[in-house]
Image (cartoon, rainbow, N blue to C red):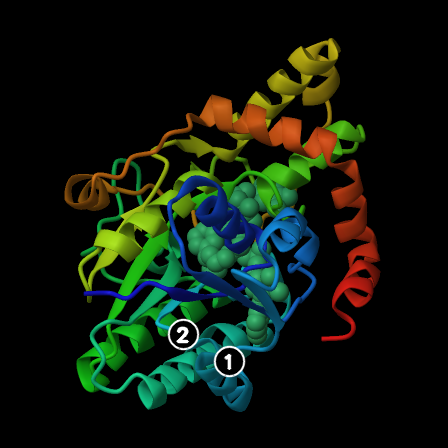
Amino acid sequence: MRRLNNIAVTGGAGFIGSNFIHYIFESTNFKGNIINVDKLTYAGNPENLASIESAFGGTRYFFENSDIGNFNEMSALFKKYDIDTMVHFAAESHVDRSIHGPAEFITTNIVGTFNLLEVARNLWPGREDVLFHHVSTDEVYGSLAEGQYFFETSPYDPQSPYSASKAASDHLVKAYKNTYGIPFTLSNCSNNYGPYQFPEKLIPLMLLNLMNDKPLPVYGDGRNVRDWLYVLDHAEAIWFILNKGRTGESYNIGGENDEENLAIVNLLCQKMAEKTGQPVSHYTSLITFVKDRPGHDRRYAINCDKIKKELGWKQQVTLSRGLDLTIEWYSSNRDWVDHVTSGEYRHWMDRNYGNR
Ligand code: NAD
Ligand code: TYD
């Protein structure tokens, strides 16, 4: 029986991690503690959790500004909070950055995960009431031809430094159960979108450019396909896995919204036009085809029947509704956007966490 009382969330100040923490406190009956372990890279922003900090900070929510690669610090945190559950989001997560500079991806995604597993191996020997949940991506399966889907049984075939680093970490997690008995669950998820996403990924980048009448850079011919999942649906899927997922199993999580990038960008143009009253051509004229990403995976599409059938999870938010919510959020959170893009959030961090 899992204890599920003191949950360490690595990367909890990032996009999905902070949505996950909001989801836990705002939409579940969880009564235990959340320890957010985050190094606060450019992608981490404690401002994402300001409302959680003021409601639960120091009682049921604890923020630790720390690097998952630091064995001594991680061991000390495990002991300090008597961690029984790890939800491991922390990673370098952007494919383009992994192409420009892969080193950090190896350090955090592979060596960092290895380090956390070593801590678990030291501090959780023989325990069956603990869980290491590893958050991974559907990109580990590689690129698909038309009509094909990723299944949990699909062979790994990663193509970018990012997906290769995530694949390596997935293999380590599985090896630590096989070799040392560390109980794990693993999820491979498709492209997320929603509030608090750093505006370097497709949807928030396009939204901010639309709001500022800037060019919309579409890579290659714009016909690459991605599956889109609203981030709080992802958070719920992870919560279901923590509670009901079978130890040692992987679960695919997806939105079942596989669309060409150009279709997504056109949809955003249409929604912006409806919102502002401008003609849609005002926005579509901003679409600019740019040089393709090297090694750009052509198509991702995910089959997530396993989590639906076994755990009873399903997506709650349609693509259209999710995009509306996201547009609304970015329109009414211009300060957040300014902070993450200007570096102001670092000053916020120093003011709020400088004495920790
Ligand atoms: P993100 O880039 O928004 O956030 C990553 C977080 O990890 C940041 O808060 C950062 O400060 C923290 N971090 C980075 N290195 C760290 C380190 N060494 N020690 C401690 N903290 C560190 O990422 P995201 O989009 O929220 O993705 C979270 C996880 O989900 C990642 O593991 C990613 O591979 C996976 N994933 C993401 C998507 C997606 O669409 N964004 C899809 C599938 C899977
Ligand atoms: P991205 O959001 O970077 O996620 P991933 O590469 O992990 O799937 O990109 C989603 C898709 O959008 C991908 O096919 C690349 C494409 N893309 C653009 O066409 N223009 C952009 O400016 C960005 C960031 C992505």
Residue 66 percent coordinates (x, y):
61, 76
Give whichever of 144, 249 is nearer the camera.
Answer: 249
Badge 1 is on which residue?
77
Give whichever of 205, 54 is nearer the camera.
Answer: 54
Above/below status of 84 relative to 123? above
Q: Is residue 203 shown to the viewer in this render?
A: yes
Crowd band around label 1 with a 10 angstrom C-alpha radius: few (<14), some (14–19), many (20+): some
Residue found at x 40% / y 74%: 83
Quick check: 136 left or right of 101? left
**Type of residue at label 2?**
Ile
Which corner quadrant of the image does residue 276 belong to? top right
- Extreme residue in the front direction: 59
Q: Which mark is residue 83?
A: 2
Q: Which mark is residue 329?
A: none
Q: CA distance from mark 2 to mark 1?
A: 8 Å
Quick check: 95 left or right of 164? right
Q: Earlier in the sequence, mark 2 or mark 1?
A: 1
Disc 2 vs disc 1: Cβ atoms closer than 8 Å? yes
Give whichever of 195, 264 is nearer the camera.
Answer: 195
Above/below status of 296 relative to 62? above
Residue 69 percent coordinates (x, y):
53, 82
Residue found at x 27% / y 81%: 176
Crowd band around label 2 with a 10 angstrom C-alpha radius: few (<14), some (14–19), many (20+): many
Tell me the element at label 2: loop
The answer to whether mark 2 is within 8 Å of ligand 1 is no
Residue 80 percent coordinates (x, y):
49, 81
